[in-house]
Image: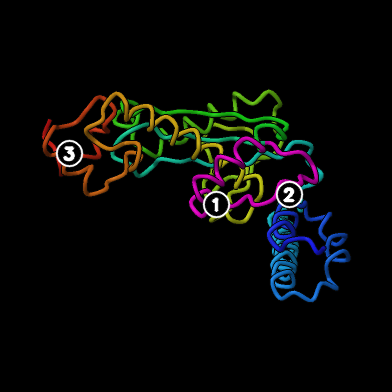
Amino acid sequence: MAEKIGIIKEKLQAAAIKELPVLFLQYESDPRAGVQAEIDKAKKRILAYEREIKRTETLKRYEREYEAFSYICGIDEVGRGPLAGPVVAGAVILPKNCDILYINDSKKLSEKKREELYDVIVEKAVAVGLGYSTPERIDEINILQATYEAMREAIGKLRVKPDLLLNDAVTIPEVEIRQVPIVKGDAKSISIGAASIVAKVTRDRLMVEYDEVYPEYGFASNKGYGAQAHIEALKKYGPCPIHRKTFITHFSKA
């Protein structure tokens, strides 16, 4: 008796990419249209996987260009634009020939994918550092200088000292390590992309925690950015302690 199509479907969906060719040989002679449709879907999985490998290889362009350096560190920040919460910088040193797939500019990834990649990056990275600049510090020295401070802190927290920094667009003052600023680097360098993901997940988790303390503003959903509901709450309730006073002058006089 032939296997049920549903069972074959489950086997194909559960199989690792490298296991699929064996299953194709097992089922390719099955004349049922449903089985052939599932095989076609599985073959598309393989093609998508191969495309992702090629895309990831293009993300290693700068890492290959500077491969003579022992420890290449990607640097990125998250949270320059919000009305509330800290700016968070990530610094990540990936191993040579890093095999992590799906790394990209964190804004181009779903929350679920960012969370998955965060765990993989933290597990496989040579070193990860995080830096923070509070709303008070942002108001005191401006967002750009506060971002630089957070980046310097992130670099300083790495357990391995990098000998090259790949930065998303900026050159960080007061840092003696050689720097390579790359415009839109979080989508062009695997190291910067990894830093972007680590910083984004870290900041988003913080804003979810702040939402429990200040539920009026919807921080869990807007992450401190100027969503309409956030602005309306700001006008109604005034600012809370994590609002950036220099960012909200149009919405609150408090």
Reading the chain from its start, which is encountered first: label 2 or label 1?
A: 2
Please name whichever residue, 137 or 40, is drawn nearer the observer in this view of the structure.
Answer: 40
In the rendered image, residue 212, in percent from the top left (x then y), is placed at: 32, 26
Instruction: Check disc 1 and report the residue beneath it.
Output: 105
Reading the chain from its start, which is encountered first: label 1 or label 3?
A: 1
Task: Name the quarter where the N terminus is drawn.
Answer: bottom right
In the rendered image, residue 111, in percent from the top left (x then y), is placed at: 49, 45
In the rendered image, residue 174, in percent from the top left (x then y), is placed at: 54, 31
Task: Name the quarter where the C terminus is drawn.
Answer: top left
In the rendered image, residue 6, in percent from the top left (x then y), is placed at: 68, 59
Residue range (magenta): 93-120
Q: Is residue 221 above or below residue 169?
A: above
Q: Is residue 143 above or below residue 29?
A: above
Instruction: Check disc 3 and report the residue beneath it.
Output: 233
Residue 129: which quarter of the image? top right
Q: CA distance from mark 1 to mark 3?
A: 30 Å
Residue at the image position 72 percent from the left and 71 percent from the top:
40
- Amino acid of disc 2: Glu
Residue at the image position 85 percent from the left and 62 percent from the top:
21
Instruction: Check disc 2 and report the residue beneath it.
Output: 63
Please name whichever residue, 32 or 212, is drawn nearer the observer in this view of the structure.
Answer: 32
Q: Is residue 254 left or right of residue 32?
A: left
How is the model colour-coded? rainbow
What secondary structure is marked by label 2? helix
Contact flag, marks 2 and 3 (Cβ < 8 Å): no
Classify 10 Å Cα crowding around label 3: few (below 14), some (14-19), many (20 and above).
Answer: some
Classify 10 Å Cα crowding around label 1: few (below 14), some (14-19), many (20 and above).
Answer: many
Q: Is residue 137 left or right of residue 204?
A: left
The residue mark sitting in front, 2 or 1, is 1
Contact flag, marks 2 and 1 (Cβ < 8 Å): no
